[in-house]
Amino acid sequence: MSPQTDPQETAAPPDLAPLTLSSGRQGRHRALLYSLAAVLVVMLGAGRLPWSRGMALVVMGLVLVLAPPVCSLRRIPLGALLALTVFGCIGLLPAGWLGGMEAWRTNLAGEWGVQLGTAFSPDWHGTLESCLLMVSGVLWLAACLGQNFSEGGRRLVLRVVVLAVLVMAVLSLLEINGWLKVSWWPRGLGKSPLTGGAFGPFSNQNHSSSLFAWSCVLCAAAALDAFRHGSRWVLVFGAGFFVLLSCILVNSSRAGLFLFIGGFNLWLAMVAMRNGGPRKAVVMLAVVICVMSVTMVAGGRVSEKLRAGSVSEVLSSDLRVWLAEQTWNAAQGFLWTGRGLGNFDFVFPQVCKEPYPDARTIHPESDVLWLLFEGGLLCVLPCLVFVGWLCLVSGPWLGGHRGGQKGHGSREGRSARRIRRAFAIAAFLALFHAVIDVPLHSLGYFMLFALVVAQAPRPRHAGEPASAGLRLAFRVLGILITAWGGLWLAMVFGGVDAGLSSQSKVVHDRAVFEVSRGRHSEAMRLISRAVELSPLDYRNYYLRAQLHLTMHQDKGGALQDFGRVRSVEPHYGPVCFAEGRLWLLYDPPAAMIPWAEGMRRYPVTHPNAQARYQEIVIDARPYPEVMPMLWKIADRAALQVTFLQMLADPGPLWNSCLDDFLAQHGGMEDLAPVLRRAVVNQWWFKGDKEKLVDFIGRHPHLMDAGWSYVTLNLAQQGRHEEACKLAAKHLPLPARSATALSSDVPRLERQQVMQPNDPLIGVELYYAQRSAGDLPSARRTLEQVLRLPNAPSFVQRELASVLSDMDDWRAAWELFRPLVEAVALSSS
């Protein structure tokens, strides 16, 4: 028996039907076209790689040509999108119009010859490309909003989007389990300390989890809609919901799990359930408990992250907090205008005050902060206006009359309102994620997001029917976007020089390929062109410097290009160490220039500074001539101790470095105890032992670090009494397995005769004999126990103590010596 349906759910009253509604067969065709276009772009790699971006632009342009808007936009959204378009292009204006160039740009041009042009944007090629992409995205969003699909059209969009995302979810699960490889999805591009790698159709696994999270809401809405209309699609969407949830659990993104919990509960409260606040609260709490329980039991990567620490600990220790703070501080200099679109990757290192030397920051992990840094408040404010308008026109959020004909002036039935609210919740989940991540900077994600956003407003908020001029304008712009996409494809597959900033990466990769074939001259030509297209990309200068050394042994040109590398990346440490390793192959002393700069980029308190220095010491070991120079790079005590530890040859260089170290640090009072122990240990094994003992004697605070070596030295001089007393003072007391429970020596002697292999009886007898003052008998008893295979570990120490009390210092030392030597070796 099929479920009962309300007539008001299936169609709006005829007299209230909107005038500019894309309905009928043509409307369904448009809905199908836009839906397939958006999901196809995501399926083809989400526009991440150059070929994928070209395909996305071609698809976008063709859709605009075939199906321009049927209605215009209202004033508020139109004004917001126009303002965003205009203000986003400010970076292309001359720098003199907006206050001139920053000092770092002038220094790069004057000292290193890095030509950045006269535009306000430091990289006008990148800004122009980003502006064109932004205009294309705005046109796509406007076209989606201008369709104003009917209820049937929105239902078709809902089902196509959900089914397509389900296909991507299944492919993702198959790929992560090694059963299938989706070769055209971007891989190896999004791995970082924050993202951890790729999953799904995006290079950033967080974006995939975000897509699956709000798709769960759409899937649940599609299942409910199918159930209300008695459709068998309810089985597909019901099963698909759990497939999407499994993708979230398998992935390692906490954000996806929290978005799912929040979005699904919001959908339950506002769409799926009618009245009853307490009932809704109970159901929502049950959902949270159930999902969290399943997550922890499932044991996926997200479960491991949740077990690793609480949410508050994650937020307080996450790099996102540091990035947000640094981005906000850097944006203050041009708060209203920003620094030009497409520039964060290259400009942020120049203006960041507290760098993170172990990694490059390519974005601030927030779409909002990214837009603020590049476009300023002039771009952020129109976006906020548009979001506010969307929130107003996508309601009512708190119920509504059953008939849908009163209260809010609704022109839609309950079924249509449920679908529209599901789209609105999905859109706001994506917007919320954009605050803490950068999904909307993905072209494919944005195209699908724009389609979802366009289904959220109430139909009565559509504008007037689109004029013939407006439709013609969109078709012309669609042709231009298609041509631009074709130019991208020609650039990738045909080798056409399109003059785009992104072409720099393509040309760089071609140059690397030419190097692998031994065609160095062609590689030099290509990489020089890449430098012209993207003068702030350090990779281009690095490869050109390598070619200088490989082709002509042109050290001057290599030094100049490597200098540019360090100038355009003033805080990134690993690039300096990589340059030094390259110089070792051609001119080893020249490696000290980048290595010294690399270590300067690591503050004294940085936890990885010592590990980085260890790496370069290992690299320099085959080149003895550079080791004295490497000692001079060690500008802090921890690095100097590392050098003393890693210098294998205990020769004149080691002694000279030790003398220099002592001249700087005196008696080492200013060093941490761990560094003191390390220096003393290395001194004993590599340096002058007599000098070390004398030094410790003049600095008693070092006795804790070097008592074992002083003890060994005293024993070598025949001063066994002093050696034993010093060892007894510093050796830790062992745990004893028996105590003196009885003082009946004859009885214990009889028990020992009857059970000679029981060490505990022997130890008991020893304590009784020692308590009685019979040290010779106690000594003989311990010697017998010590010969047993299962003798307790403290027996050796007790025997040494008895021998000391008997003034047999030589014999006592023979027992103390292995204990002291073990301490000395463990400290080396």
Image (tube, rainbow, N blue to C red):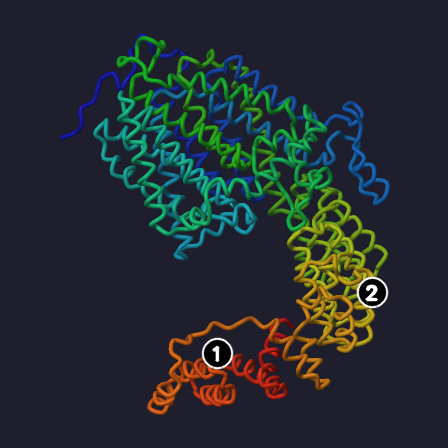
Q: Is residue 369 left or right of residue 72?
A: right
Which of labels 1 and 2 is toward the front?
1
Q: Is 79 above or below relative to 566?
A: above
Give the residue drawn at x 71%, y 71%. Answer: 682
Image-based side of 421 in relation to 331, left or right: left
Q: Is residue 122 left or right of residue 304?
A: right
Task: Decide if residue 517 is in sight here.
Answer: no
User: Label 1 amino acid?
Assistant: Ser
Position of 451 with respect to 218 (left or right) is right
Q: CA distance from mark 1 to mark 2?
A: 43 Å
Residue in front for this viewpoint, 272 or 227: 272
The quadrant in which residue 483 appears is top right
How many numbered circles does the render carry? 2
Whether tag 1 and tag 2 are in contact, CB under 8 A, the answer is no
- Which residue is under mark 1? 793
Of label 1 and label 2, which has the lower sequence position?
2
Quarter of the image for residue 333 reads top right
Choose between 764 and 448: the one closer to the eye.
Answer: 764
Tell me the element at label 2: helix
Residue picked out by circle 2: 660
Residue at 28% from the left image edge and 28% from the top image edge: 225
Q: Is residue 526 visible?
A: yes
Name the spot of residue 104 as percent of width and height, x first. 79, 38
Q: Is residue 774 above or below residue 338?
A: below
Choose between 176 and 737: the one closer to the eye: 737
Kind of residue at badge 2: Asp
Q: Residue shown at 83%/55% (left/top)?
A: 557
Could you say which disc has been placed on residue 440 in the image?
none
Q: Residue 53's spot in the image, x, y percent?
A: 56, 40
Classed neighbour count for the residue bearing mark 2: other residues with Cα under 10 Å, few (<14), some (14–19), many (≥20): some
Mark 1 is surrounded, within 10 Å at the Cα level, by few (under 14), some (14 to 19) or many (20 or more) other residues, namely: few
